[in-house]
Amino acid sequence: MSSDPWGRVDETGTVYVRTAEGEQVVGSWQAGSPEEALAYFERKYEGLVVEIGLLERRVKTTDLSAKDAQAAIDHLRAQVDEHHAVGDLAALRTRLDGLVSTVEARREERKVQKAKQTDAAREAKQALVTEAEELAQSDQWRSAGERLRALVDTWKGLPRLDRKSDDELWHRFSHARSAFSKRRKAHFASLDAQREEARKAKEKLVTEAESLSGSTDWGGTAARYRELMTEWKAAGRAQREAEDDLWNRFRGAQDVFFAARGEVFAERDAEQTENLKLKEELAAEAERLLPVKDLKAARAAFRALNERWEAVGHVPRDARPRVEGRMQTVERALQESEENEWRRTNPEARARAAGLTGQLQAAVDKLRTQIDTARASGNNARADKLAKELEGRQALLDQALKGLQEFGG
């Protein structure tokens, strides 16, 4: 006989599972050892664990309906209750009970959500009806008509209410649309004269658009085309057959102009890209002048590079600060070298530095003599005081000597 904490196999090959209500027969095993029997039914238990885990995830992370979830729970519960597996069956029942609670909570949430959606749909449809009734009185035929069509699309996308409420709101909505349609038809019956005026106005716009199609005043002409488009929209519609022909001519004239402008701009962009490459090469050549060793030669070379730079021409706007900054960095380095050279060779500054150094050297020599005299006379306190003063003067002298060395002396 073989057993584990949740089951056993007796001498006849009968497999039992232990439960709170006592042992339950799982099945009979004659095909192998008792250990194999227990392992087989433990695997069936693990299979149930996996199935319940999958169902838990589906309930939590998908839109599984409450009906389908409950059916799956009942199916798994039936398998657990049949005791055809070895393991903690009570734990599985507890998990299934938890799933039932979760599904029920989800069911209630969906009921509340559906009620909210219904209320929202009712408010939305009431708002659509109110807006449609306002639009029914509008004289803005095109925009109001387009808006009413958009309202219909919005209505179709909303959930249905109860039949009575939905029918009442739809009747008001439909009546508003019909009233607007009747007024619009009556209005357009008298629009022939206005359409003829629109045709004449657009004919003039087309004539001007065609006269501008060969212009090379890119900025001014493009701005005028935008103005013509605004005037076109404001002119109203001509008769249908005239409208399409005029529009094709109007649009065609613009296309000719903008295609020509596009070619010119493309050539300009290509030229500026090549200019950028040349200026980057010049900047790299200028950077090789640093650090400055021969100031005169470096300055002459930089002037020659700068002349070539000025002759190159424009580069793309977004690259300009970067490439110009490289040249400016080199120029600042040359200026600093010139200033350092001037300071080093300035006779007045050199004389001042030499004079200060001499004064400090005399003061240091005097203090050393006074210290020696004080020590010889046994006045160590005075000697120590003078030694501290000497230390400060010596530091100033060292600094002055270093400055004098910068002047080459």
Image (cartoon, rainbow, N blue to C red):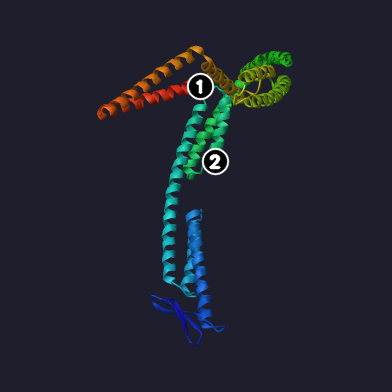
Residue 304 in picture, x, y percent from top left: 67, 17
Q: Considering the numbered disc 1 on the image, is that residue within a helix, a strand or a loop?
A: helix
Q: Amino acid at mark 2?
A: Gly
- In the drawing, what numbered circle is on residue 363? none
Callout 2 crowding tier (Cα within 10 Å): few <14, some 14–19, many ≥20: few
Label 1 with label 2: CB-CB less than 8 Å: no
Front-most of 305 and 91? Answer: 305
Disc 1 or disc 2, which is closer to the eye? Answer: 1
Residue 42 shown left or right of residue 299 in the figure: left
Mark 1: which amino acid? Glu
The picture quadrant where one finds residue 362 is: top left
Total number of numbered discs in the rendering: 2
Q: Secondary structure at mark 2?
A: loop
Residue tagged 1: 406
Residue 9 seen from this side: no
Q: Nearer the viewer, residue 403 or 122?
A: 403
Seen from the viewer's position, the closer of residues 92 and 34 is: 34
* Residue 286: percent from left, percent from top: 64, 24
**Residue 106 in picture, x, y percent from top left:** 44, 54
Q: Where on the picture, by quarter, is residue 342? A: top right
Residue 150 against residue 339 in the figure, above or below:
below
Q: Is residue 104 above or below residue 314?
A: below
Disc on the earlier residue, 1 or 2: 2
In the rendered structure, the answer to whether residue 306 lies left or right of residue 119 reads right
Query: Where in the figure is residue 50, as x and y percent of width and height?
Result: 51, 65
Residue at mark 2: 157
Q: Residues within 10 Å of mark 1 (few under 14, many from 20)?
A: some
- Observer-nearest residue: 235 or 371? 371
Q: Tell me the residue at 50%/57% (across/down).
A: 58
Above or below for 122 versus 310: below
The CA span between labels 1 and 2 is 86 Å
Left or right of 77, for residue 141? right
